[in-house]
Amino acid sequence: MTHPIRASLGWGPRLALLLGLGLGLVACDPSDDAAAPVARRVPDATLRVHVVAPSTPTDEGLAYLRAMADVHDRADRARGEDRLQTLRQGLSLPVPAGLAEAEVLRLDLAARLADELMTTPHGAPTARELLAPMLDVERSLPLDRATARALVVLGDAAVATGDDALAAGSYARSIEIMSSLRQELEP
Amino acid sequence: MTQPLQDHSRPKRSPTQREAAEVSRIAAELAALGEDPADDDELELVRTAAVDADANVRTVATLVELSGWVAPADGLLPLERHRVWQRIAKQTAATRTTPAARPTELEHTGSSANGFTTWRGVVVSLSLVASVTMLLRVDVAPPPSAEDRAALESMGEATRAVLEGTLPGEQDGSRARALADGYAERLQAARGAER
């Protein structure tokens, strides 16, 4: 029986090839268009990752995780600006010291908030401003699906704001994260 | 044809007490070494050296002697002067790496060298400007075309499809709830172990 994850492995090489071509296009295209809002840069696909180890459980840690779950539940029931406000409040919750799991949940929440912002008028720059510092190439990112998702959303926001180098770099980094996760899941 | 330099030397004068003492010291040293005593010419040389001990005085005296020196080439025939020039050219070639040349040729060579230096400077300047232009073009490259942008957007869609296809994650709330539940179990286990 074919494992559902392994059944779609063919996407990886094809997407990697597409991304390679995309990185090349963004880096070398000589066409002229002075109306672009953002000056082009070379895509940076630098990726530093770390594995999130389970932390020592505490009451404060458990309260935070449950609060984050509640934020998502309330956001599911809300619409429009109320949903955005709920997600923002979730990101502003103070993280207990030593709670490694919070990093993944915050990335997931930020990705969801950015996704919601992208659906609003002029929300793409805000989404980019939200995610870009959290996913900076200088930072070590958790090796988790939440990181791959947040990178995809950052890539979408970068495309919407005209930063093609950031978009190509973010997509490439997301693919690399997914590739690493697949390798971990393979028997 | 050459005239002796001694013709332009200073007239002799009576030795001073310090010069006499110097001559006596040298005579004693020569005697101690078993050498012959100094003759009149040598003593005159010692006396002159003692008087011209100051470097500036010696320099001025030498310049005066040279200014009064009659060049031996004045009496040479044209063929002899040509040979002298050839000899000078050979000596110049031996001491320099560049070929020797007569004064007119040296002038011509100098102007060519200056011209080459000027052109070389122009070429270097143009190369520098071209390099800076290329660097600026790389750093501030023009944006991609509409086709490239469409390709980038489709890549984003494909990446998202891979994310959902290969790593189908739980919905946002479910993931957080699952993490919280697992965390709560570990907390219960840790408390049970403490009791």
Image: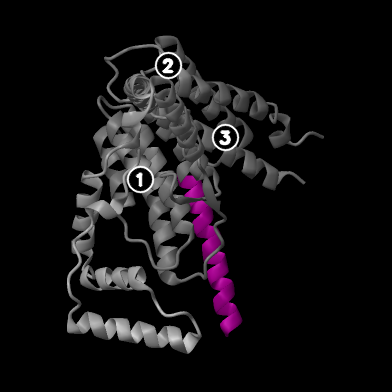
Looking at the rendered structure, which numbered label has been put on residue A175?
3
Amino acid type, callout 2: Arg
The numbered mark, 1 or 3, whose residue comes first in the sequence reads: 1
Q: Is residue B118 left or right of residue A23?
A: left
Is label 1 in contact with label 3 (beta carbons under 8 Å)?
A: no
Amino acid type, callout 1: Pro
What residue is disc 1 on?
A133
Q: Is residue B179 left or right of residue B74?
A: right
The stretch of residues the image draws in magenta is: B173-195
Q: Residue at x 37, y 30 (%)?
A: A157
| CA distance for labels 1 and 2 | 24 Å
**Majority secondary structure of magenta residues:** helix
Report x, y in % for residue B192. 58, 78
Q: Residue at x 58, y 38 (%)?
A: A176
Q: Is residue B135 magenta?
A: no
Q: Chain of mark 1?
A: A
- Tell me: residue A85, above or below residue B176: above
What residue is disc 2 on?
B149
Q: Quadrant of the N terminus of chain A?
A: top right
Report x, y in % for residue B104. 34, 20
Hey, which residue is sitting farthest right in the picture?
Answer: A1
The answer to whether residue A75 is visible is no
